[in-house]
């Protein structure tokens, strides 16, 4: 799939400025400021365009919806999640857990990354349509690459478990700042959480088949 | 510690209605509606009082701050997190992981629980002071009981790791609705995530001492 992360590349129709990463970045910056000030519901594509000083049609050229705009702000400029996650998934199979934690921290354990997380998560959690599009965005850009590298029948479940641990780590360590997890060096977090992701991705999962749901394994 | 969960019981001074759980619940309902409609920043103690039809002083009688009001809305009425978490921590040591997942799902895997999670998390993530008070609330009501039952030197770190997995599970399964995790029966989630919590609480952790942070264990 060509194009930049999550914007759903569309062919240019009109716009007062030349299309390019700078304009896209300008729109994303304006959107982040609007979401932060007004919240998801009160932010509009038109308001974002006004703040960015571009025509509303140009905003729609890059982003299909407000929620798409929200999700695209999660990743720092220049990072294509598909590429980096794909690289981790293609690396040594027994190191994929630790490498994934390291990757996640390298992208978001910065002041800019933390601000992005806070803005996007609070927006995604505040409104149903935002959450749904956010999930769709993650599927397209992150989880898809990871699941494709696994070649397991329950790849989607494994990726979902990884997502549950990664999202929670990001929220507790970087957004909420829960101690002592928040002050731990990155290597410490990798050593603690890496094995969990490794287990979810490549270990023996206690998968409960639907017909067994009243007598789970492991008890 | 006496009193109800997280409201920081204060002695009555004044108030147009008799103090009691009903009034407290009325104020919490009004607060949830205000937070949902206006977001954390635009909600005021005064606005909550107006919506609940009570004197602002009565809101301050039950809740120290707006963030306290936000956090207290996380738990369904009648549930005291200190009591239930204390019971899990005091139960069989080798089942604490699975029982904790089961407990978390029993409290929040309902339409009401999901609405509470969404409202509180989006509020806590949207503003710095809310996040800080939210953490303080969790420490007082949930994590404190859990850490006290562990009797381990690194109890706070273990509880933080548990929090990271639990928060992420709640967000992905119940708020965002990530499939197939969202549709899995509770027993299935217990079987998959319980062992992770068990490991974090009672297993051998690869704790990296500060002076070793450039040569982590397990690599």
Image (cartoon, coloured by chain):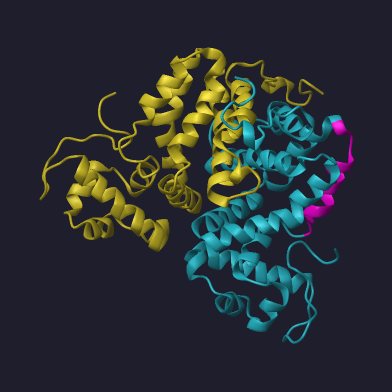
Chain colours: A cyan, B yellow
Q: Quadrant of residue B169 in the image?
A: top right
Say if residue B61 shows up in the picture. Answer: no
Q: Quadrant of residue A32 in the image?
A: bottom right
Residue A82 part of the magenta segment: yes
Q: Residue at x 61, y 33 (%)?
A: B188
Measuring from the top left, give residue B152's x and y in whole percent.
Answer: 54, 13
Query: Dominant secondary structure of the magenta stretch?
Result: helix
Quadrant that contains the N terminus of chain A: bottom right
B40 shown above or below B160: below
B128 shown above or below B34: above
Return the residue nearer the eye: A128 or B214.
A128
Q: Residue at x 81, y 35 (%)?
A: A96
Measuring from the top left, give residue A184's x and y in whole percent.
Answer: 64, 30
Residue A168 part of the magenta segment: no
Quadrant that contains the C terminus of chain A: top right
Return the residue nearer the eye: A216 or A180.
A216
Measuring from the top left, give residue B40's x and y in whole percent.
Answer: 41, 56
In the rendered picture of this protein, how many numbered marks are placed on residues? 0
Return the residue nearer the eye: A112 or A157.
A157
Say if residue B104 shows up in the picture. Answer: yes
Measuring from the top left, give residue A133's x and y in whole percent.
Answer: 63, 61
Specify whether B72 is left or right of B122.
Answer: left
Which residue range is magenta in the image? A78-93
């Amino acid at each position: 799939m060509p194009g930049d992360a999550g914007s759903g590349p569309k062919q240019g129709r009109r716009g007062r400025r030349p299309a390019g990463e700078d304009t896209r970045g300008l729109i994303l910056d304006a959107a982040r400021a609007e979401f932060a000030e007004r919240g998801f519901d009160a932010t509009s594509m038109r308001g974002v365009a006004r703040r960015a000083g571009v025509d509303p049609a140009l905003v729609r050229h890059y982003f299909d919806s407000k929620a798409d705009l929200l999700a695209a702000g999660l990743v720092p400029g220049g990072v294509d999640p598909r590429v980096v996650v794909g690289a981790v998934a293609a690396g040594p199979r027994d190191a994929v857990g630790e490498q994934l934690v390291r990757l996640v921290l390298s992208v978001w354990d910065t002041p800019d990354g933390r601000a992005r997380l806070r803005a996007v998560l609070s927006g995604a959690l505040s409104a149903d349509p935002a959450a749904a599009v956010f999930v769709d965005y993650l599927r397209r850009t992150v989880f898809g690459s990871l699941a494709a590298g696994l070649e397991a029948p329950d790849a989607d479940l494994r990726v979902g478990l990884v997502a549950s641990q990664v999202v929670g780590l990001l929220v507790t360590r970087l957004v909420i700042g829960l101690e002592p997890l928040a002050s731990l060096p990155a290597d410490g977090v990798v050593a603690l959480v890496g094995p969990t992701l490794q287990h979810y991705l490549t270990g023996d999962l206690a998968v409960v088949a639907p017909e067994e749901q009243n007598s789970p394994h492991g008890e």
